[in-house]
Image (cartoon, grey):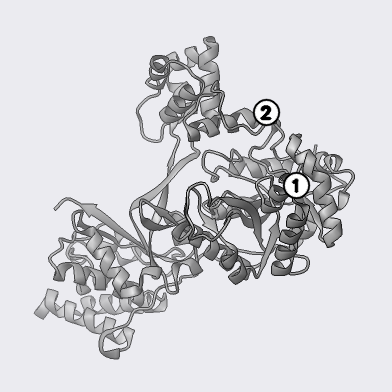
């Protein structure tokens, strides 16, 4: 039943972007929050911010206030120290109050990957001291620095840590986090956390470290952990949470759980009121382009267009042709895309100058006469009657996008040139996520449930091999699959569990074509990560475009 009297805000929540750990699927999370009558919710995935924009948009659509945050890993020494069995990390929850907080958080999360990765992306106190402004800090779960000191029996150390973080984040911005999932260790330190808060005059905040939506979903989360750790559900050494209490609880459940400290629940709403960060969509943030010899960029662009017009058409330049080019230039200028054309022109010019094969141009970009004139495309839009408006329309909200093909053997040379020109901190490749498609979900779950491989393989092959196939669709199309699910208890459990994890992100990797170039350093706009030695954005191609950043689609072709 929806809450009507008391309000509670979950401030410690792991979505499916706590990869193979969190089972709070973002769309269903908002349904759950709405059903409980709660008005705000935070995202605090482990060490990364992959899902923040999807979370934000889903919350806004549902009429729920989104709170952007992250449960970071703080290195036990510094983020640069990486000695086995000495250098670990402790958890800390950070929530954005405003844009300053968001910019500080993405810089720290980025550094956690780029500088501090050691089993996990780790930040350190040095980063916190540089980038604490605009953030609210919670002392985290049992893996937090303060709980760890209390578990070790060192109350004074815990007290000193609390004073450090309180002094760093400032009055009203640091909270002692209390949790109770029925774990013996939590119940042992709970009174100590309360005592510490009272003795240091720090506020308490109650959280539930939610990893799944409802109590019955605990098995889903256990399956995800087994997929992550390559275990089966019957193994003795499976990483277990110990109870099935790590879910999105109602306000009544939370107030009852912490009835001795109602202020800890009420403080969740006070924190929610202070957190007011909004993403900015649809505002273009193009990099700077410096024309040679200090020339004005528009003047340089127009001169390139004129040279190209003469080169391609010579004595055949009609009034209609010139009017078409002038119209395109006026639209490109008015919409603020001259720099975009020049940036693309420049790296294509470089590739050709060093003998890297470049494709003739694909997609709607081939409809631009200006692009043809300056050498971005090699297809005459006049000859083939192609429309400029399909590429760039004054009514269009999203950025235009040139699809450029380069020889797969030398594509990296083009990226290296862009890095040299704009700076390594202004260029990043773009993340993509491998998701658990229908057949893969069956195979993953089958292994975890310890079902014989041959049995699982037979069931998986009953899913039709068609694009965008889902288990729901497969059950409609395949009578044999449907019969197996209805008559065989083992197959029924397999399919039901696979349905629950289908579509979840399984791992992060690097997009084959996407590169982003930013005006200021990339970590001023988006959090960064590392994949196979490459620096990548933590946001996908679609999100990068929505945020108004320059996304280059640099595709590979055989040469």
Q: Which marked residue is nearer to the observer: mark 2 or mark 1?
A: 1
Query: Which residue is denoted by mark 2 in the rendering?
Result: 216
Task: Name the image quarter holding residue 14.
Answer: top right
Image quadrant holding the N terminus, namely: top right
Whole-percent x, y for residue 121 in the image: 50, 53
**Relative height, residue 57 to residue 106 (above, below):** above
In space, the residues marked 2 and 1 are separated at their CA atoms by: 35 Å
Residue 325 in view, yes or no: yes
Residue depicted at x 52% and y 38% = 20
**Relative height, residue 559 to residue 373 (above, below):** above
Is residue 301 found left or right of 202 in the rendered image? Answer: left
Q: The residue tagged with tag 2: helix, strand or loop?
A: helix
Is residue 464 found left or right of 558 in the rendered image? Answer: right
Is residue 144 found left or right of 440 in the rendered image? Answer: right
Graded by Cα atoms within 10 Å as few (under 14), some (14 to 19) or many (20 or more), the crowding at tag 1 reads few
Is residue 48 found left or right of 428 in the rendered image? Answer: right
Whole-percent x, y for residue 289 in the image: 34, 79
**Relative height, residue 520 to residue 401 (above, below):** below
Query: Which residue is denoted by mark 1 in the rendering?
Result: 153
């Amino acid at each position: 039943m929806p809450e009507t009297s008391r309000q509670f805000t979950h401030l410690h929540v792991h979505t499916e972007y706590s990869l193979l750990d969190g089972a709070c699927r973002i769309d269903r999370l908002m349904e759950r929050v709405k059903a409980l009558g709660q008005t705000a919710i935070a995202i605090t995935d482990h060490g990364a911010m992959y899902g923040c924009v999807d979370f934000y948009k889903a919350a806004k659509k549902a009429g729920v206030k989104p709170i952007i945050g992250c449960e970071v890993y703080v290195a036990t020494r510094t983020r640069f120290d990486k000695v086995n069995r000495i250098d670990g990390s402790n958890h800390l929850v950070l929530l954005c109050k405003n844009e300053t907080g968001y910019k500080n958080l993405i810089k720290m999360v980025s550094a956690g990957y780029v500088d501090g990765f050691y089993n996990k992306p780790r930040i350190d106190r040095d980063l916190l001291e540089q980038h604490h402004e605009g953030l609210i800090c919670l002392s985290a779960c049992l893996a937090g620095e303060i709980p760890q000191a209390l578990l070790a029996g060192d109350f004074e150390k815990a007290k000193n840590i609390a004073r450090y973080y309180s002094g760093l984040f400032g009055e009203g911005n640091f909270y002692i986090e209390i949790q109770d999932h029925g774990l013996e260790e939590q119940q042992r330190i709970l009174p100590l956390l309360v005592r510490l808060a009272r003795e240091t005059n720090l506020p308490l905040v109650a959280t539930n470290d939610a990893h799944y939506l409802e109590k019955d979903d605990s098995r889903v989360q256990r399956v995800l952990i087994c997929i992550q750790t390559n275990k089966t559900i019957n193994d003795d050494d499976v990483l277990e949470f110990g109870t099935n209490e790590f879910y999105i609880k109602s306000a009544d459940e939370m107030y009852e759980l912490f009835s001795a400290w109602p202020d800890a629940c009420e403080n969740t709403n006070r924190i929610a009121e202070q957190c007011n960060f909004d993403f900015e969509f649809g505002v273009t943030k193009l990099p700077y382009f410096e024309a040679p010899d200090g020339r004005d960029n528009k003047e340089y662009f127009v001169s390139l267009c004129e040279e190209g017009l003469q080169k391609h058409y010579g004595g055949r330049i009609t009034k209609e042709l010139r009017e078409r080019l002038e119209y395109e230039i006026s639209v490109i200028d008015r919409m603020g895309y001259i720099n975009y054309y020049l940036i693309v022109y420049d790296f294509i010019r470089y590739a050709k100058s060093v003998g890297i094969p470049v494709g003739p141009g694909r997609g709607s970009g081939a409809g631009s006469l200006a692009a043809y004139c300056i050498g971005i495309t090699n297809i005459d839009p006049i000859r083939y009657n192609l429309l400029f408006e399909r590429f760039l329309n004054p009514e269009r909200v999203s950025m235009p996008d040139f699809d450029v093909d380069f020889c797969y053997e030398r594509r990296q040379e083009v990226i290296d040139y862009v890095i040299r020109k704009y700076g390594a901190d202004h260029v990043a490749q773009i993340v993509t996520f491998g998701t658990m498609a229908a057949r893969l979900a069956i195979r993953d779950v089958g292994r975890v449930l310890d079902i014989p491989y041959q049995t699982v393989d037979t069931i998986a092959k009953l899913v039709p091999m068609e694009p965008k196939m889902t288990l729901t669709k497969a059950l409609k199309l395949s009578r044999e699959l449907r019969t197996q699910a209805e008559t065989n208890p083992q197959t029924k459990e397999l399919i039901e569990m696979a349905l629950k994890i289908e579509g979840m992100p399984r791992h992060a990797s690097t997009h084959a074509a996407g590169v982003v170039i930013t005006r200021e350093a990339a970590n001023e706009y988006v959090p960064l990560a590392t994949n196979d030695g490459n620096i990548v954005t933590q946001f996908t191609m679609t999100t990068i475009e929505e945020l108004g950043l320059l996304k280059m689609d640099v595709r590979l072709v055989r040469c």
